Amino acid sequence: MAQTERFVVSDEIHPIDIVEAVATHHAWEFDRLADDQIAMVVAGQWRNYSVTLAWSTREEVLRLICTFDMDPPADRLPLIYETINLANDQVWDGGFTFWSQQRLMVWRYGLVLAGDAFASPEQIDQMISNALIACERFYPSFQLVGWGDTTPSAALDIAMGEAYGRA
């Protein structure tokens, strides 16, 4: 049985239904906020991450937003923004931003499904996984810049890249 068949059996399923199947597969608690939106909390090594996915029929985009609380001192915000820019230069998909009013660090990614394209469960699983990997990878850097006496470039030196191969 293909991995896809373990998640869903139909290719006519709404993208958020597929996200729900992926969340169920991983035993993540989720809340279906609407037909086109789902939210979940996923435990990471550093903290819990709030993950929300929403489907826009008009734009034909499945949007992922992964957030975590961050309330750095106001005088450190310029350095946080510099760290975000440096971190975004090191990633291929998605990117970070800081929502200052909500005091949230945010990872955003949009999967374009134009022309009746279909999102597979593997794509959605990888999309969520990539968001969590990015947040886990750069969380220590953001912390060092926000509350330590570390420059953005020095803080990014500790952001570990993905490991390839086997030990």
Image: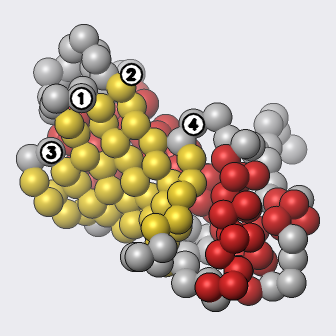
> What number is the disc on residue 36?
3
Q: In the image, what residue type sits under mark 1?
A: Glu
Sequence-first tag of 1 and 2: 2
Residue 125 screen position, x and y as percent: 43, 40
Sequence-first tag of 4 and 1: 1
Q: In the image, what residue type sits under mark 4?
A: Asp
Please give the residue where the numbered disc 4 appears in the rendered image. Answer: 93
Identify the element where label 1 is drawn. loop
Q: In the image, what residue type sits under mark 2?
A: Ala
Q: Residue furthest left?
A: 35
Query: Would you place residue 120 above or below residue 35 in this image?
Result: above
**Alpha-carbon distance for marks 4 and 1?**
19 Å
Q: Residues within 10 Å of mark 2 (few under 14, many from 20)?
A: few
Q: Residue at x 64, y 34 (%)?
A: 92
Please give the residue where the numbered disc 1 appears in the rendered image. Answer: 59
Identify the element where label 3 is drawn. loop
**Alpha-carbon distance for marks 3 and 4?**
22 Å
